[in-house]
């Protein structure tokens, strides 16, 4: 295996609030390897975005309690703010979740792309920056890029703003590209176009990519490996084929079963019962046990937090006491659907 370009070990992040301490991320560990796309999946509030923002130094209200994050073997936690600022937007680039709040409404799209270029290329001229910016907008599929370059964010549609954000993230040919819910709040046809733009971005920059999403369809389309998160912890990790064909955590299965199946007639969707737990006072034992059909009130689930353990398949880990009982899930589901 090659050396990971980004490595996170035992990352734990907390937020102090009036109601108590929010345990946003708990002991998260994973590696990102050159050229791959890693999907980080989970419900809202599971810690997906916070884990990325924290290692980039973008959560001033939060606190990293413990853990380590290293980029090309160099600790991001021990870097000076000036060093980290040089990496952000350059070698480490992020596509933020909501382009309307991430883009400055009183500056043109072109000016904001110029800023990203000038911050990491001090000698670049205005004409070079403009040519590069227009080329980036054209690359991500913005029509009439030379005219759009001088327009403001409110003159762009939602899909076009997202394309502009992707163009900005690509500006300095990043080594790591983090895409935070890049298709949220976009209609289905625009989502499909943004997926193609993300493929273009990775092809052009050759960046290792982290895709933060709750959309399993997007994961199946774009990702090589998957980290499934629940209540701040990684509950299952593995390559995308293994996760979809042989899931070994009840939460992963719950996410899959909640998707509508278009090939058969179904009267009802199958949501995961209950609500995500409070991150201020999570339940004892496995955080998923109050919603879990596999637990069935077993005391081990209610009293002991399971470790992330090997399932017997290469690089496939599950945080479930009884993951062995999920073997053959796909064939049983197929039989139930056929019946």
Image (tube, rainbow, N blue to C red):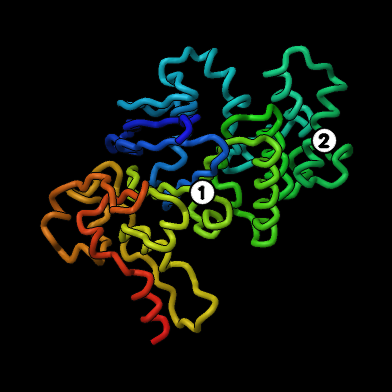
Q: Quadrant of residue 92?
A: top right
Q: What SS does tag 1 mark?
A: loop
Horizontal side, residue 235 vs residue 77: left or right: left
Secondary structure beneath label 2: helix
Q: Real-space Cα distance between discs 1 and 2? A: 29 Å
In x, y percent, where is residue 54? Answer: 44, 29
Tag on residue 224? Answer: 1
* Residue drawn at the location 68% of the way across and 38% of the way down: 165
Image vertical order of residue 13 relative to residue 38, above or below:
above
Left or right, 152 with respect to 302, comes to: right
Q: Quadrant of residue 209?
A: top right
Q: Nearer the viewer, residue 93 or 336?
A: 336
Question: Is any atom of residue 22 visible in this view?
Answer: no
Q: Nearer the viewer, residue 171 or 231?
A: 171
> Few, some or many C-alpha atoms within 10 Å of disc 2 (few <14, some 14-19, many ≥20)?
some
Q: Residue visible at 45% across and 21% down?
A: 73
Q: Residue at x 37, y 81 (%)?
A: 335
Q: Residues within 10 Å of mark 1 (few under 14, many from 20)?
A: some
Residue 135: mark: 2
Q: Tell which residue pokes out farthest to the bottom in this image.
A: 339
The answer to whether residue 110 is visible is yes
Number of marks: 2
The mark nearer the N terminus, 1 or 2, is 2
Front one among 271 and 177:
177
């Amino acid at each position: 295996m090659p050396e990971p370009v980004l490595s996170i070990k035992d990352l734990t992040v907390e937020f102090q609030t009036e109601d108590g301490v929010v345990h946003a991320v708990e002991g998260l560990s994973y590696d990102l390897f050159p050229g791959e796309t890693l999907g980080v999946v989970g419900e809202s509030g599971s810690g997906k975005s916070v884990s990325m923002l924290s290692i980039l130094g973008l959560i001033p209200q939060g606190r990293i309690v413990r853990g380590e994050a290293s980029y090309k073997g160099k600790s991001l936690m021990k870097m000076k703010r000036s060093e980290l600022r040089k990496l952000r937007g350059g070698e480490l680039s992020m596509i933020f979740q909501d382009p309307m709040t991430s883009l400055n409404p009183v500056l043109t799209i072109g000016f904001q792309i110029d800023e990203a270029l000038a911050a990491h290329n001090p000698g670049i001229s205005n004409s070079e920056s403009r040519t590069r910016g227009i080329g980036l907008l054209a690359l991500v599929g913005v029509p009439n890029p030379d005219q759009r370059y001088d327009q403001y964010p409110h003159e762009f549609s939602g899909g076009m703003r997202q394309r502009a954000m992707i163009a900005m993230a690509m500006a300095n040919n990043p080594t790591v590209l983090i895409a935070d819910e890049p298709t949220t709040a976009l209609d289905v046809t625009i989502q499909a176009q943004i997926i193609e733009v993300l493929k273009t971005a990775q092809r052009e920059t050759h960046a290792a990519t982290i895709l933060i999403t709750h959309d399993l369809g997007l994961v199946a389309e774009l990702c090589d490996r998957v980290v499934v998160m629940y209540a701040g912890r990684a509950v299952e990790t593995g390559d995308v084929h293994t996760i979809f064909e042989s899931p070994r955590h009840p939460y992963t299965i719950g996410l899959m079963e909640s998707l509508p199946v278009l090939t058969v007639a179904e009267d009802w969707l199958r949501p995961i019962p209950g609500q995500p737990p409070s991150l201020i006072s999570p339940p004892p034992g496995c955080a998923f046990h109050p919603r879990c059909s596999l637990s069935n009130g077993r005391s081990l689930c209610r009293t002991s937090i399971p470790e992330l353990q090997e399932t017997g398949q290469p690089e496939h880990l599950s945080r479930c006491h009884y993951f062995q009982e999920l073997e053959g899930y796909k064939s049983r589901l197929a039989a139930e659907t056929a019946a």
